[in-house]
Amino acid sequence: MALEIERKFLIRDDTWKSAATGSARILQGYFARTALVRARIRIYGDKGFITLKSEPGALVRHEYEYEIPYADAVEMIKQFSIEPIIRKTRFDVPYEGVVWAVDVFDGANSGLVIAEAELKTADQALAIPSWAGKEVTGDRRYGNSDLARYPFLTWDKNGNPPWDKDDA
């Protein structure tokens, strides 16, 4: 069974940048959303992927991801995206045995920076770097599928997205 076990944090400051070992541009479009699954196409650097993920906001989620031809990914994003495209640059930042993914969003999510640490087990100990701020693992506002639907720049001054009445 394919599981994603991940913790997410907002970024406190830029000190992570000096430890970054690589980066890649990411574009992703969502083509299906139900109560049980989010389906996306992602271009990660020079590769394409199709991914199915279970409902966001949990530490452990089902995730099925498959590489697809790059040209197909480009065309599928153009043809099938039901919401605006997520645009970000992902930086690899090693810290105490874990390579953190620091996502610097742009476009409609400019100003948002989130760090994710993928774990092997749900109870794995995780050293938190000083640049990692508030944990947002269980906060679905910070899930990419919700950021496509309710971009960061549309949130009010209290950090509340403009949820639809049905989503509240």
Image (tube, grey):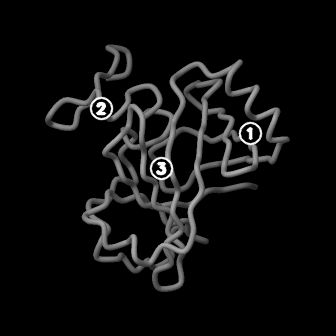
Foreground disc of the pair 2, 1: 2
The answer to which quarter of the image holds residue 125 is: bottom left
Residue 101 spot, x, y in % from top left: 51, 63
- In the picture of the structure, the residue carrying the numbered disc 1 is 50
Q: Earlier in the sequence, mark 2 or mark 1?
A: 1
Please, what is the three-letter code of the amino acid marked with disc 2? Leu
Q: Residues within 10 Å of mark 1 (few under 14, many from 20)?
A: many
Left or right: residue 151 versus residue 160 is right
Residue 26 vs residue 41, the one in the foreground: 26
The answer to which quarter of the image holds residue 85 is: top right
Q: Residue lying farthest left?
A: 157
Q: CA distance from mark 2 to mark 3?
A: 24 Å
Residue drawn 51% across and 78% down? Answer: 94
Left or right: residue 76 versus residue 54 is right
Residue 93 vs residue 8, the one in the foreground: 93
Q: Count of labels shown?
A: 3
- In the picture of the structure, the residue carrying the numbered disc 3 is 58
Q: Residue lying farthest top?
A: 165
Left or right: residue 48 versus residue 165 is right
Residue 15 spot, x, y in % from top left: 31, 73
Disc marking residue 108: none
Q: Residues within 10 Å of mark 3 (few under 14, many from 20)?
A: some
- In the picture of the structure, the residue carrying the numbered disc 2 is 153
Say which element carries label 3.
loop
Q: CA distance from mark 3 to mark 1?
A: 21 Å
Say which element carries label 2.
helix
Please, what is the three-letter code of the amino acid marked with disc 3? Ala
Left or right: residue 35 versus residue 162 is right
Quadrant (top left, top right, bottom left, bottom right) of the C terminus = top left
Residue drawn 60% across and 40% down? Answer: 54
Is residue 146 depicted above or below 11 in this figure? above
